[in-house]
Image (cartoon, grey):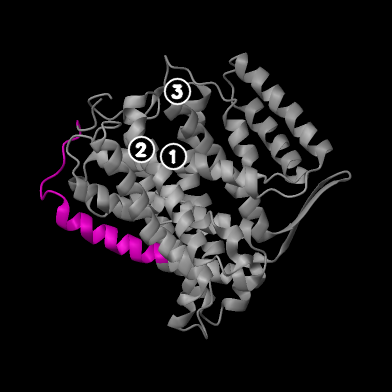
Amino acid sequence: MVRAIAPLLRDFLQKESAGGIVLIFAAALALAVANSPLASAYTGFLEIPVVAAIGSFVIDKPLLLWINDGLMAVFFFLVGLEVKREVLEGQLSSWNKASLPLIAAIGGMAIPALVFIGLNLDSPDNIQGWAIPAATDIAFALGILSLLGPRVPVALKALLLAIAVIDDIGAIAIIALFYSGELDTGMLGAAAVVFVLMLAVGRAKVQSTIPYVLLAILMWAFVLKSGVHATLAGVAAAMTIPLDPNSDHGPLERMEHALHPWVAFLVIPIFGFANAGVTLVGIDASALLDPLPLGIALGLLVGKQLGIFGFAWVAVKTGLAKLPDEVNWRQIHALSLLAAIGFTMSLFIGNLAFATPGQIDAVKLGVLSGSTVAALAGYFLLKITLPETAAPIESYEE
């Protein structure tokens, strides 16, 4: 890899870290409001019906679903841009760069799912939540890392980012394969036509972002009506945006740079506030031992550590991958705990997996408890393992 982290990556890490702090406050605020006299107002606000119509084409959803299906499509569009850039010229562009995060991320998705399934074998109604603990919240994790300042090696941040990007690719595939509804072939066909148009615009290397934005909105509306989860339209649209390897001002780079602060400081915190509000009144500690929240919490806490650390250790010891300079195994262990902060993506998948209020509250309880313990444990483990002086910037080499 390059000897110094690219300015675009450094800027990404800084914004994502700050956004993670905002997300933490948004989640804490949601919990406080949901357990206060304002709880009914909070719930009622999220249930406000919002209607958009053009002729006979009508989208009628409560505000919460506009957030989860609409705003999160913007998040997934940004994820798609980041994935495309990383695959073509970034940390996933060669085996030497991608091997360690790829193998670690596979373990970090597979083992948590197995832990969840193992704890829910006798609860068939819960099994569809198997993917919930497989997710990683990169904003939250980098937000915790940012609390330790320049002591954190940039190589460790970049490794966490790469693992999270691969994790996002896995989450996108899981949503497409397992959490889509009955298909409307007409709407899906219309979305495919728009996608082909976007590909043509991208192939023509149109530099203005306006055609891409307009077509992406149109494709999102068709995908929403098709039965495929609407957020996947964001990923598909991102794949059509051209990347100019000879310029930092191509459409992909400009859209990524423009969207990132909006996603980090508005979209994700709004999602966190709208989805983290679980009522704790009447819930005692024994509720955490129910199979659904326990499977999620232990899937995150135990599964991520076993999966990421274990698979990374085997990959390095067998010569399939190389540990980055300035990073040691204790830090990799701490990183596996930070990757156990599921939060945004775990809550998102939980909302797709379950429909009953009781199950959704159980998902929130498992995600919040597991993510909180992971955040605290990862922070304190890093605090005692990191050097006292600032880490060098030129630390993530090929």
Position of residue 353 in the picture relative to residue 309 (left or right): right
Q: Which residue is drawn at 21% across and 54% down?
A: 382
Q: Which kind of residue does numbered mark 1 sit on?
A: Val
Residue to which mark 1 is pinned: 165
Number of other residues with Cα within 10 Å of mark 2, as a class: few under 14, some 14 to 19, many 20 or more:
many
- Is residue 350 highlighted in magenta? no
**Which residue carries the number 2 mark?**
101
Q: Is residue 277 at all visible to an observer of this figure?
A: no
Q: What residue type is labelled 2?
A: Pro
The CA span between labels 1 and 2 is 9 Å
Q: Mark 3 points at which residue?
A: 88
In the structure shown, which secondary structural element does the residue marked by tag 1 occupy?
A: helix
Q: How busy is the neighbourhood of tag 3: few (under 14 within 10 Å), some, or many (20 plus)?
A: few
Residue 184: x and y, percent?
Answer: 81, 42
- At a point 61% along the width and 15% down the height, the residue shown is 203
Q: Report how far apart the C-alphas of labels 3 and 2 lie in the structure.
A: 16 Å
| Mark 1 crowdedness (10 Å alpha carbons): few <14, some 14-19, many ≥20 | many
